[in-house]
Amino acid sequence: MRIPAILAVALLTASCVSGPGPSLEMRPSTASPAAGQAAPRSVIAVISVSGGFRNAEARQAFKDTLSARLSKCGATTLFMTPPSGGGRVFAKDVLEDGRPAADVPHDHVLFVREARYEVSGGLTTSYLDAVLKNSSSGKEVWRTAGVVRRTMIMSDGMNEFAGALVDRMISDRLMVSCR
């Protein structure tokens, strides 16, 4: 009788222990009625995140995750620093690979912005939002937000956010042919 009770207590205790990994909370998203009419095929991602990327490797990992996940849905992704206008991509804006953004055909622009971040007691919390705009009309077709919490030693929470963005695009029917 004592052995099953001890095993039950051990199992309950083990299930309460969690690792030091990141935490991701996605907020509700909104999509315009026109969002599902033309799935993104060529996306310029404009990333404006400061506290979420402690180093170049973390930023690159985020871009790699976002690009790989969108690629599985048939979309190519190019990256650039925030444009001067904030809401559109202008001819003078340059992609991270050095090409002028205006010279690269794209149908959507994904703006990922860190509204703010907080560091407290070894925990970094990033409040992020993402907006997808149609390139030809300049109109917003989709929006979501999320909160990423991670310790000083964990940086993969931003990768989880990249994956969650694409998952949300799929569930909101913006992306249709994902494998």
Image (spheres, rainbow, N blue to C red):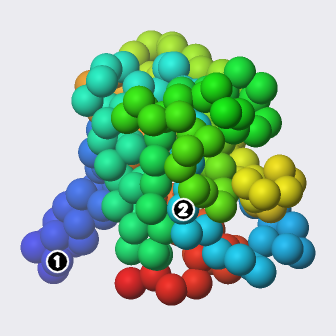
Q: Nearer the viewer, residue 142 or 156?
A: 142
Q: Residue 105 or 61: which is nearer the viewer?
A: 105
Identify the residue at horizontal 10%, vertical 73% (top origin). Answer: 3
Q: Is residue 30 left or right of residue 170?
A: right
* Residue 156 shows in the view: no
Q: Amino acid at mark 1?
A: Pro
The numbered dot on residue 4 is: 1
Residue at 40% in and 67% down:
71
Q: Tell me which corner region of the image, top left, top right, bottom left or bottom right, holds residue 139.
A: bottom right
Q: In the picture, which quadrant includes the N terminus?
A: bottom left
Residue 114: image location, x then y, percent: 62, 29
Q: Does residue 32 lie above or below 91 as drawn?
A: below
Residue 96 falls left or right of residue 94: left
Q: Residue 143's x, y, as percent?
A: 76, 54
Secondary element under disc 2, as helix, strand or loop, is: strand
Mark 2 to mark 1 CA distance (whole Å): 58 Å
- Disc 2 versus disc 1: nearer the observer: 2
- Image-quadrant location for residue 153: top left
